[in-house]
Image: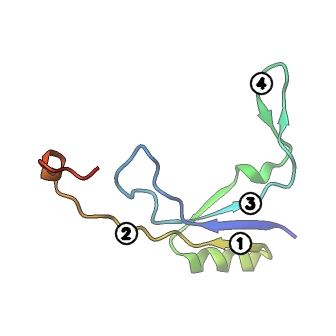
Amino acid sequence: MVRVRIYQPAKTAMQSGKGNTRQWVLEFEPTERPLNDALMGWVGSGDVNRQIRLSFASKAEALAYAKRKGYVAQVRDPQVRSPQPKSYADNFAFQKIS
């Protein structure tokens, strides 16, 4: 029984736009613990499925793929953001609310 995660990635802290966040991602859950190499400081594993990351246009496509392959899928729905509209002039307001 292979377990997979299906989610929509969040935007990174280094970007203000929502590029690369529209697609749904299917990742395999790790089956082995990572191994630390004491000499080089590298982290490795014998689990080759950790390198696979599949992208889909919709959640339904990702779920259909997981079902077709016989994977047990855990779906994480994205958190909905409610942005606070701000004006640039508010940065220089006399009675600025911090």
Q: Is 88 left, or right, of 20 in this rendering?
A: left
Q: Which residue is mark 2?
A: 82
x, y (%) of residue 49?
77, 54
Q: Report the Cα–Cα distance between label 2 and label 1.
A: 25 Å
Pick the front one: 96 or 22: 96
Nearer-N-terminus badge (3/2): 3
Q: Secondary structure at mark 3?
A: strand
Q: Which residue is mark 3?
A: 28
Nearer-N-terminus badge (3/4): 3
Nearer-N-terminus badge (1/4): 4
Q: Secondary structure at mark 4?
A: loop
Q: Secondary structure at mark 1?
A: strand
Pick the front one: 90 or 88: 90
Q: What amino acid type should be assigned to the residue bearing mark 1?
A: Gln
Q: Which residue is mark 1?
A: 74
Please say if 20 is above or below 61.
Answer: above
Q: Is 33 left, or right, of 83 in this rendering?
A: right
Q: Which residue is mark 4?
A: 41
x, y (%) of residue 11?
45, 55
Nearer-N-terminus badge (2/4): 4
Question: Nearer the observer, disc 3 or disc 4?
Answer: 4
